Image (tube, rainbow, N blue to C red):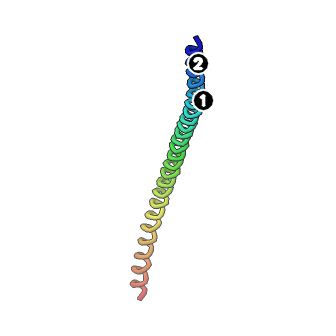
């Protein structure tokens, strides 16, 4: 019986050692996996915010371009009329 007790004790010690080793490594794996998932979620949130800002800036830019185009057309017409008026005066 003593050899079986010895083998059982060694097997128990090996099982405990393996449990401790795998528990630590599996905890590190789970922690790293959670960190990666959080990073992916944060990246997605940041990307969404950047896209919202881009869309808002594009709309504002388009509105300003329309305004400046209208203003340019009016000023061009006024400038042309001014030259015609000056030609008539001379």
The quadrant the C terminus occupies is bottom left
Q: Quadrant of residue 10?
A: top right
Q: Nearer the viewer, residue 87 or 68?
A: 68
**Marks 2, 1: nearer the viewer:** 2
Residue 20: mark: 1
Seen from this angle, which residue lies furthest bottom? 90
Q: Position of residue 24 (x, y in %)?
A: 59, 33
Q: Please tell me which residue is depicted at 58% across the width and 10% down the height of the picture.
A: 1
Q: Nearer the viewer, residue 55 or 89?
A: 55
Disc 2 residue crowd, few under 14, some 14–19, many 20+, Cα 10 Å: few
Q: Quadrant of residue 29?
A: top right
Height in image: 13 above or below 78?
above
Q: Nearer the viewer, residue 44 or 21?
A: 21
Disc 1 residue crowd, few under 14, some 14–19, many 20+, Cα 10 Å: few
Determine the CA span between mark 2 and mark 1: 21 Å
The residue singled out by tag 2 in the image is 6
Q: Please tell me which residue is depicted at 45% across the width and 61% down the height of the picture.
A: 65
Q: Secondary structure at mark 2?
A: helix
Q: Nearer the viewer, residue 24 or 3?
A: 3
Height in image: 67 above or below 84?
above
Seen from this angle, which residue lies furthest top? 1
Residue 49: mark: none
Q: Position of residue 59 (x, y in %)?
A: 48, 53
């Amino acid at each position: 019986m003593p050899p079986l007790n010895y083998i059982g004790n060694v097997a128990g010690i090996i099982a405990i050692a393996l449990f401790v080793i795998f528990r630590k490594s599996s905890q590190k794996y789970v922690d790293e996996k959670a960190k990666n998932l959080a990073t992916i979620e944060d990246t997605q949130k940041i990307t969404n915010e950047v896209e919202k800002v881009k869309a808002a800036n594009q709309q504002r830019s388009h509105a300003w371009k329309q305004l400046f185009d209208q203003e340019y057309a009016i000023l061009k017409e006024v400038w042309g009329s001014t030259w015609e008026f000056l030609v008539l005066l001379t």
